[in-house]
Image (cartoon, rainbow, N blue to C red):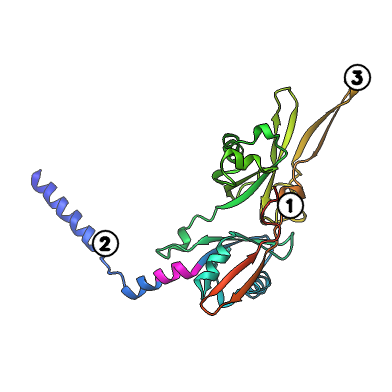
Amino acid sequence: MNDILAKAAALSCGDEDEDSLELEADSGTTESLEILATTAVLGRLLTKRAFSVSHLKDLLKRVWRSIVGWSLQELGMGLYVIRFEKKQHLELIMRYRTWMLSGPSGALLALFDWPQNGEWGKVDCSSIPIWIQVHGLPVMFMSQTNATKLAAKAGSLLDIHNKGQEGILGWKFLRLKVLVNLNRPLFAGCYVPWPNGDKVWAQFRYERITALCYKCGTLGHDHHWCITEPAMLKTKREYKYGSTEVGSVRKLGPRIVLVMCQAFQIVRRPSQLALLMEEGVHRPSP
């Protein structure tokens, strides 16, 4: 019996040696991957429309008017690699992970860091950080604890604008950076009960988001392409003398998105190239 087991073990080891092959990493390829990780980004295009590479390039040229020296290559499955000649340009573009294309009903380009090992097919492109404004909250509910609870409705909380109780109370709304799943419907808002029994609507507004369907709440198409019945929200209005009116309104609409406009300006200095961004209405007014 021992002889049989020994022969089986030897045969197994022989099979493993025959089925495996040890390879050496090429130093040139490794160096190229390191360069690519600092000069390229991975893009995911969310749309139901057909976009050729040339058409996508033309749209990006309009959006990135002052950014030059970049190239785009299609990888498949709605993914693209975008290379930049200047690292400053890449960093500027990556300050905003979502870019609107072809107007409010067009497409949305989401950007992700290029992987260090070059395995772009294994990058999780399902979620992206998005700044969300929560409007309609009474001052008594403006706290970091409640910010965490509200953010959990839309995704995972990453950051809070103007942290600290004094900073939060200085704004008319909460501004939260949330990791949002792009494959799920966006969370529109929720009712928040007051201590006296009344309810207020906390409206979620997503910055730099377009191509949103106001029927189903998912990204990548508008309501003209959607066959889903619109999501409805029940309403109840009370009048004097005890009469009430029950109805419903659409849960999703233009109020859920907050379109931002940016203009890039490149200023040449004797010592360096300074990149300035005119952010328009990006910074919320207190």
Residue linked to disc 1: 226
Amino acid at pointer 2:
Asp
List x then y, in percent, for residue 166: 60, 39
Q: Quadrant of residue 155?
A: top right
**Mark 3 near mark 2, Cβ–Cβ under 8 Å?**
no
Residue 36 falls inside the magenta stretch = yes
Which numbered disc covers residue 43?
Answer: none
Callout 3 crowding tier (Cα within 10 Å): few <14, some 14–19, many ≥20? few
User: Is disc 3 placed on a helix, strand or loop?
Assistant: helix
List x then y, in percent, for residue 39: 48, 70
Q: Nearer the viewer, mark 3 or mark 2?
A: 3
Amino acid at pointer 3:
Tyr
**In the depicted view, which residue is nearer to us: 247 or 69?**
69
Name the residue located 46 percent from the left edge and 58 percent from the top edge: 122
Q: Quadrant of residue 282?
A: bottom right
Residue linked to disc 3: 241
Name the residue located 59 percent from the left edge and 38 percent from the top edge: 165
